[in-house]
Image (cartoon, rainbow, N blue to C red):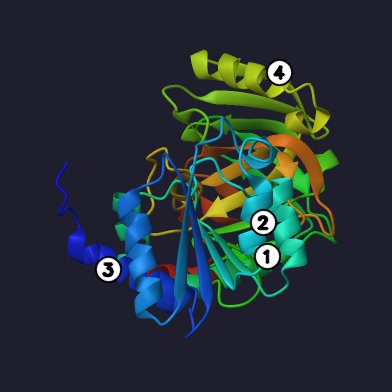
């Protein structure tokens, strides 16, 4: 591997992350967590940027768990990790098998009320450069907020794709609709920029979801579509190739009802994202939609979420999004006139 690959660009991406998005201030403690599948160059560049901004970086390298969410709790030294993060100002997570949705993360986030937690699981150099160093975050924030407002105002949502997806659901009036704009400049749970995420009224999810991008982080990029048939918010059956059978068996082997139910839905609008098998990037591919299954975080369904043993996300490409019967995108392209000007600023 070329050790100088994107060496200069790494610095710019890290400065954007640390100074613009996280707004690390003089004297703040920033804990960076990573596992043995994380990209060391990204971790080190971030720590350097924190230090240069006047912060106090602390890097934790951890063994890689066998899964995500609550699967990390007993695998990792959770008590020691909590001890550090309960005193931190900012937490940047690069773990491939992420803490998000774990009991460890929930306790830290609920207890440390000043913590800014930015979840960037499995981030690696190529993705890091494209999604941070080469992106106008301010312009993307404006688009995401505008789309969020439209989704928030809708009562009913339908998603279709050319691959055969046709799923619909009602929005829940008490569940927040989150514009994931990447800014972690105030306390809370934050994520990579480029999508809107929310938990619908789970019992109303009906139809077929077609994953034709990826299933991450456990499986990766798909070689054939996975068709998931939903009935009143529960997986009825799954069709497709090898990945479909493996994914369904993986979900059912937990023997937990929430692993067969959706946790959230997302729509992606990052102008530089593409399908690579990297969790954060895949979810944010422009014009795509994405579903999570399993554990529901408290930031999606306050105040406690819905616990489950793990979590997995699947991506559907080039979605048509209908809000109360009116499309805002068709086959992944924005058709709502009030959103098109925001898209042009991002080159879309």
The answer to whether mark 1 and mark 2 are in CB contact below 8 A is: yes
Between disc 4 and disc 1, whose residue precedes?
A: 1
- Helix, strand or loop under label 4: loop
Between disc 3 and disc 1, whose residue precedes?
A: 3
Between disc 2 and disc 4, whose residue precedes?
A: 2
Spatial CA span between label 3 and label 1: 28 Å
Q: Mark 4, mark 1: which one is toward the viewer?
A: 1
Residue 4 % position (x, y): 15, 54
Spatial CA span between label 1 and label 2: 6 Å
Considering the image in quadrants, where does the C terminus appear?
Answer: bottom left
Local packing at callout 4 (Cα closer than 10 Å; few below 14, some 14-19, many 20+) is: few
49 shown above or below 231: below
Q: Which of the numbered marks, if any, corresponds to residue 347? A: none
Q: Mark 4, mark 3: which one is toward the viewer?
A: 3
Residue 309 % position (x, y): 73, 34
Local packing at callout 3 (Cα closer than 10 Å; few below 14, some 14-19, many 20+) is: some
Spatial CA span between label 2 and label 4: 29 Å
Q: Nearer the viewer, residue 32 or 218?
A: 32
Q: Which of the numbered marks, if any, corresponds to residue 82? A: 2
Local packing at callout 1 (Cα closer than 10 Å; few below 14, some 14-19, many 20+) is: some
The answer to whether mark 4 and mark 3 are in CB contact below 8 A is: no
Residue 203 % position (x, y): 85, 39
What residue is shown with label 3?
A: 11
Local packing at callout 2 (Cα closer than 10 Å; few below 14, some 14-19, many 20+) is: some
What residue is shown with label 1?
A: 86
Would residue 274 appear left or right of 82 to someone viewing this image?
Answer: left
Would residue 256 appear left or right of 136 to someone viewing this image?
Answer: right
Q: Residue reaching furthest bottom?
A: 26
The answer to whether mark 4 and mark 1 are in CB contact below 8 A is: no
**Which residue is rendered at x = 82% and y = 48% of the image?**
201
């Amino acid at each position: 591997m070329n050790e100088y690959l994107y060496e200069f660009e790494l610095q710019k991406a890290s400065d954007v992350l640390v100074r613009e998005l996280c707004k690390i201030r003089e004297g703040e403690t920033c804990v960076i967590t990573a596992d043995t599948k994380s990209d060391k160059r990204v971790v080190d560049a971030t720590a350097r940027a924190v230090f240069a901004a006047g912060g106090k970086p602390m890097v934790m390298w951890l063994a890689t768990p066998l899964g995500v969410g609550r699967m990390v709790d007993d695998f990792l030294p959770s008590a020691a990790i909590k001890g550090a993060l309960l005193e931190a100002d900012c937490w940047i997570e690069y773990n491939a098998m992420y803490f998000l949705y774990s009991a460890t993360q929930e306790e830290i986030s609920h207890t440390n009320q000043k913590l800014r937690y930015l979840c960037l699981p499995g981030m690696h150099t190529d993705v890091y450069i494209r999604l941070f160093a080469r992106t106008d975050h301010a312009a993307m924030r404006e688009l995401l907020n505008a789309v969020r407002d439209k989704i928030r105002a809708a009562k009913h949502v339908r998603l279709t794709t050319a691959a055969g997806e046709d799923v619909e659901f009602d929005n829940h009036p008490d569940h927040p609709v989150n514009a994931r704009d990447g800014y972690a400049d105030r306390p809370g749970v934050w994520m990579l920029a480029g999508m809107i995420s929310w938990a619908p009224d789970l019992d109303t999810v009906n139809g077929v979801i077609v994953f034709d991008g990826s299933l991450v982080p456990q499986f990766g990029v798909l070689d054939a579509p996975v068709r998931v048939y939903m009935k009143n918010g529960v997986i009825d059956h799954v069709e497709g190739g090898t990945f479909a059978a493996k994914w369904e068996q993986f979900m059912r082997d937990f023997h937990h009802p929430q692993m067969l139910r959706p946790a959230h839905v997302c729509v992606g609008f990052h102008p530089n994202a593409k399908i690579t098998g990297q969790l954060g990037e895949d979810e944010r591919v422009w014009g795509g939609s994405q579903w999570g299954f399993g554990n529901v975080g408290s930031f999606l369904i306050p105040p406690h979420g819905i616990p489950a043993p793990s979590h997995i996300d699947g991506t559907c490409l080039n979605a048509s999004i209908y809000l109360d019967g009116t499309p805002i995108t068709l086959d992944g392209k924005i058709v709502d006139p009030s959103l098109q000007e925001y898209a042009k600023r991002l080159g879309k």
